[in-house]
Amino acid sequence: MHSFKQYGDREKLIEGETRAAIKKHLQQQQQKQQLQQQQQQQQQQQIEQSPEYKPNPPAAAADAAACAAASAAANAAANAAAAGGLQEKQQQQKMQQQYNCSSGTAATAAAATAAAAVSLPQETAETVGLRVCGVLLLLLLLQQKDGQRQQQHKQQGEKEAAAKQNCKTKTQAAAAAAAAAAAAAAAAAAAQTNLQQQYQQQQQQQQQQQQHQQQQHQQQQQQHQQQQQQQQQQQHQQQQHQQQQQQRQQRQHQQQQHQQQQHQQQQHQQQ
């Protein structure tokens, strides 16, 4: 009688602890799922707002919806197991839905169920079911942690890819801007050189024109001076010619006077 009482107390203790653990775990899971959904929504908004955003294919969304449905079904099965209203076979069928996304986890759950049934032959089917549910719950935790790690790794990869793409885009834009600036600088330098050459050519042409004008002016002055000299020479020659004529006239006049004197002398002698 004492042993049956101890066994009953032990069974109730295990059942109570299992139910409390499952309830606590479900609460934690709900909180984690809510937090994870909020984080995913925030990350999705950030990704959609980024210029590198590309929508996920429909297959990935369908897989995510299927896994979420399986998780909800598993949580409902765990709640029913905690209430103690299901048998071991039904619990295994309910918990099996959680592992539709992974084939290896279902085999592990079945092995854990068989091990629990063999190791506890004296306990009731409900207690065995609760223990199996606890084992499956641990497996579920491991799978969810692994899924979280994979999701974090995927998100980290997406962030790194987006950062690399952003860096690549910025690098390409900077290279294009540098090339454009170099081309603009080269064009400006060529234009400046062309302007300098044109200015130098204009200056040289102006200097040449000024020199040519100065030479023409000097030539004109020289010609004018030559003309003046020629005029002076002509005037001087004319003066000399006039003087010569005057001298001739004087000589002729003297000769005439001399002849008159001789004629007068002859007349005087004849008288």
Image: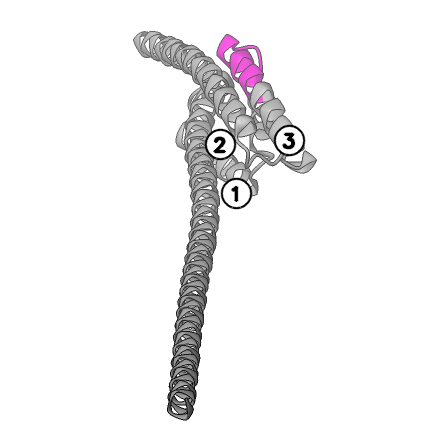
Mark positioned earlier in the residue sequence (1 or 3): 3
The count of marks equals 3
Q: Looking at the picture, does residue 17 appear above or below residue 214?
A: above
- Tell me whether circle 2 and circle 3 mark residues in contact (CB < 8 Å): no
**Residue 223 x, y percent position in the rendering:** 44, 71
Query: By what rule are the colours in the image chosen?
Result: one colour
Which mark, residue 61? Answer: 3
Separation of marks 2 and 3 at Cα, in angstroms? 32 Å
11 left or right of 133 in image: left
Separation of marks 2 and 1 at Cα, in angstroms? 15 Å
Say which residue label 2 marks: 113
Principal SS element in the magenta part? helix
Q: Which is nearer the eye, 111 or 96?
A: 96
Secondary structure category for the residue under label 2: helix
**Residue 263 x, y percent position in the rendering:** 43, 88
Give the farthest residue toward the right. Answer: 58
Within-10-Å neighbours for mark 1: few <14, some 14–19, many 20+: few
- Under mark 2, the amino acid is Thr
Quarter occupied by the C terminus: bottom left
For the point 48% across and 25% down, the residue is 43
- Under mark 3, the amino acid is Ala
Say which residue label 1 marks: 104
| Magenta highlight range | 74-86
For the point 58% across and 36% down, the residue is 101
Quarter occupied by the N terminus: top left
Judged by depth in the image, the label closer to the viewer, 2 or 3, is: 3
Judged by depth in the image, the label closer to the viewer, 1 or 3, is: 3
**Residue 40 x, y percent position in the rendering:** 50, 23
